[in-house]
Amino acid sequence: MTKLSLKDVLGKIQEELGKREIVHEEVQRDMRRATRLSKQAILFTHQERFTDARKLLTEAEELFTKLRKVSKNYPDMFYSGMVDAAFQEYAEAHTLLCLVKEDRFVDPEELKIPSISYVLGLADVIGELRRRSLDSLRKGDVKTAEKCLQTMEQIYVELMAMDEAYMLVPGLRRKSDVARHVIESSRGDITIEARRSTLEDCMKNLEKIVKLQQKKR
């Protein structure tokens, strides 16, 4: 066995750390980009530019594939905070797109992401569904708004049913508390608009009846 001096040993370690730092910076750049792509995909989904949204998510998926290859040599990088944030945003964007376009949920295996990141991303979908419901109300589409509310409540109830998840998924309780307030606000907005729309329809029908009676005279 070749005898190495301490200087040689530390030199090799320094070289290894230098390579690691380069990889770390590249991973951070890729994860920031993946997060931006997912945020943009959410915006496109709200604009109903579904093809563009899916294209951006495909780009993000390619960055995650690259990450998995890198993590074979540097496994700890797969579990960094920035990677987890990128996974959460990706889960949120993908779930929203599939709900709006295909009326279905995706699962972590389909997205190839950790379950915890999926659950936290799913919780954030509730906020995006509120945004879609408000956009629908502005367009006078109460039916779509009510569908959004129904899905928001479904997500919340299912997350609340995961008792142990609150201990195992950091941040889920806070997100669930926010989600509850979001749902309550959305329910109030939709109820007010539904009543206003019903009243407006009644007024229009009454107006038609009055006109018909006037013509008969």
Image (cartoon, grey):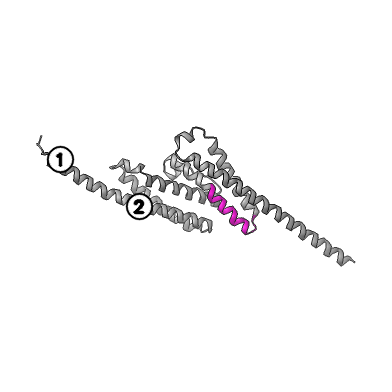
User: Secondary structure under badge 1?
Assistant: helix
Question: For this view, does 92 lie left or right of residue 34?
Answer: right
Q: Residues within 10 Å of mark 1 (few under 14, many from 20)?
A: few
Tell me the residue that label 1 is attached to.
9
Q: Residues within 10 Å of mark 2 (few under 14, many from 20)?
A: many
What residue is drawn where x is 47% and y is 43%? 120
Q: What is the tally of numbered marks visible in this picture?
A: 2
- The spot of residue 142 in percent (x, y) is 65, 54
Asked whether disc 1 touches disc 2, contact meaning CB atoms under 8 Å apart, the reply is: no
Q: Which mark is residue 30?
A: 2
CA gap between label 1 and label 2 equals: 32 Å
User: Secondary structure under badge 2?
Assistant: helix
Front in this rendered view, residue 111 or 168: 168
Q: For the magenta stretch, what is the residue range?
A: 126-141
- The spot of residue 53 in percent (x, y) is 47, 56
Q: Amino acid at mark 2?
A: Asp
Question: For this view, does 202 lie left or right of residue 132?
Answer: right
Front in this rendered view, residue 51 or 158: 158
